[in-house]
Image (cartoon, helix red, strand yellow):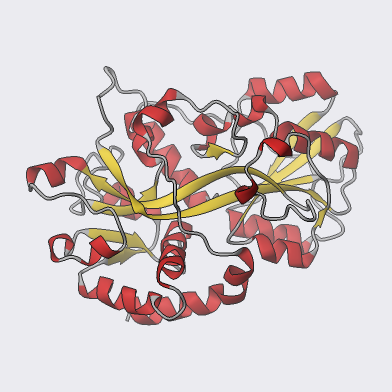
Amino acid sequence: MSTTRRITVTALAVAAGMTALAACGSGGSGGDKDPKTVTLVSHDSFNVSKSVLAEFTEQTGYKVDVLKGGDAGKAVNQAILSKGNPQGDVFFGIDNTLLSRGLKEGIFSPYQAKGLESVPAELQLDQAEHRVTPVDYGDTCVNYDRAYFAEHKIAPPETFDDLLEPEYKGLLITENSATSSPGLAFQLGTVAKYGESGWQDYWKKLKANGVEVVDGWEQAYNERFSGSAAGKGKGDKPLVVSYASSPPVEVLGKKPEPKEAPTGVAAGTCFRQVEFAGLLKGAKNEKGGKALLDFLLSKKFQEDVPLQMFVNPARKDAKVPELFTKYGRKIDKPETVAPEAITKNREQWIKQWSSLVLK
């Protein structure tokens, strides 16, 4: 998932009184000579409990060094630039919007991780070759401020089509597709929903209905969204593009716990992002890298994922905390776009979106 989303989680968590965990140190590189060290290359937002990594070390004898390389896009670019002489052994954090680029560049060596049989087939986007392993997934969706809609006696929107209705005119704020991954994900959701021939017309109508665009999630959610705890509800927009996991974070740390989260999710506006890990081609500790991939799919790591990175574990048998099940919304039919189509059209779609919406 994106760095922007991680920032979202961190900001919300802090607002709820939770200190974001710096679960692991950084440093090291694929140049490590210590055969007992395995290096995980990732984006800045990778988080895992110290006790979980300690269990991996206890089980395998390998110490994990985490090398963080900026946001997801930057980290993937670095992995491509260092192809054949990687910075580490395993890369974590390439999602379905960037996946086909990484696969095309040939930066991963095939490995079928243990536990993959417990991952639903729809998350296994490379199941024929096993160059990457699905680790988690999350959904980008429009969130709404329950208090606003109750006060104004308006039903909150549920679908993309709803957002075009007059009662929602001027209420939605979203992020720039060119500068924000949730913004791009929201755009991709409209591409999936309305197709190549229809998504631009949808955005013309959305613009006519007063959608506002800002550069990134932080500004949209914490400064403009009226339901943001981190922004203390001072924004003037009751609709914002965020995540299906944002409502549980709004509840985190609250005493007593409310019956429902103060924000809700428009389930018909969601786009699914799947995040993968893979063994880097040329890894100096290939054996350790394979062991780490196995561990990323272990129930121990998978059940640590939700409250560390606020996404869902890939394994269907991994337990999800009550915070997610009680206050989150399960998205049964998210929109998706094939990674190959995203890679082929991403830049063109962003240019077209910018021309339509920003001018």
Where residue 232 sits in the image (x, y, percent)? 23, 39
Q: Is residue 285 visible?
A: no
Q: Quarter of the image holding residue 80?
A: bottom right
Q: Which residue is located at x 76 percent, y 38 percent?
A: 293
Residue 253 horizontal/vertical position (percent): 35, 23
Say if 125 sits above or below 338 in the image.
Answer: above
Instruction: Name the quarter where the C terminus is drawn.
Output: bottom left
Classify residue 230 as left or right of residue 51: left
- In percent of the image, x 59 and y 64: which residue is there? 338
- In the rendering, at what x and y percent does residue 8 appear? 42, 44
Q: Is residue 335 left or right of residue 40?
A: left
> Quadrant location of residue 168?
bottom left
Q: Is residue 101 visible?
A: yes
Residue 57 in the image: x percent, y percent?
78, 23
User: Which residue: 55% across, 25% down?
Assistant: 319
**Residue 7 versus residue 209 in the image, above or below:** above
